[in-house]
Amino acid sequence: MSGFAEALIYILQTLGGLYLLIVLLRFILQLVRADFYNPLSQFALKATQPLLKPLRRIIPGLGGLDMASLVLALLVQLLLMVLVILIAGANPLSAGPQLLVWAIIAVTSLFLKIFFFAMIISVILSWVAPGSYNPGAQLVNQICEPLLAPFRKLIPNLGGLDISPIFAFMALHLLDRFVIGNLAAMSGMPAILSPFI
């Protein structure tokens, strides 16, 4: 593969990945019932609205969740993978239905990574700016709370020290490494698509 093709794949993965992140973040914000009047939530809404509006006419919500945003995330991931395979000089049709499986694995991996990095930001903010009213800090805490709540019920309070993020990090890491990694290997995901997971 030429240097130009590698650069093109890098640009595609970066820019496409950013948009995919925003689409999946919109789904997560709805999943955790985050504040949609937060300026960052409003940005996610406005950035994804043009593509979601037509999808909503076809795909109904399910249990209060906007399934159209999840389908859009899968479609964007699928398109990115097809383009990367084409730029690499291979035929995406040879993968067939495996492409959809790879897209589901990649979106699930990104889903876990969003929670992982949101928790890292939350932990750092709890040290540097505890109780901050910054819109970004509030949104990060709203994303992390549903993940941390089950661990807080199981782990006793250690005199004001919250160690539940440690166990949440471990759970996310185990899921990412052993479930997502093994699923990608078992499905035969090519190395050219590994940056997506």
Image (spheres, helix red, strand yellow):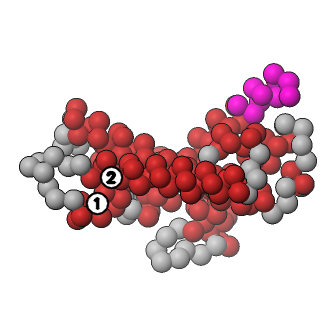
Inspect the magenta stretch and tell me whether residue 44 lies in it: no
Q: Residue 41: in sight, yes or no?
A: no
Residue marked by disc 2: 167
The percent coordinates of residue 67 (x first, y second) are: 57, 68
Q: Is residue 193 left or right of residue 164?
A: right
Quadrant position of residue 61: bottom right
Residue marked by disc 1: 151
Q: Which residues are magenta?
A: 1-10
Task: Tell which of 60 and 99 is nearer to you.
Answer: 99
Residue positioned 67% across, 53% down in the render: 184
Lower sequence index among marks 2 and 1: 1
Q: Main secondary structure of the magenta part?
A: helix
The percent coordinates of residue 111 (x first, y second) are: 52, 54
- The kind of residue on which mark 1 rests is Phe
Task: Tell which of 50 and 81 is nearer to you.
Answer: 81
Query: Quick one: label 2, few (<14), some, or many (20+) residues within 10 Å?
Result: some
Disc 2 to disc 1: CB gap under 8 Å: yes
Q: Is residue 122 left or right of residue 63?
A: left
Q: Residue 14: in sight, yes or no?
A: yes
Secondary element at image label 1: helix
Inspect the magenta stretch and tell me whether residue 6 lies in it: yes
For the N terminus, the quadrant is top right
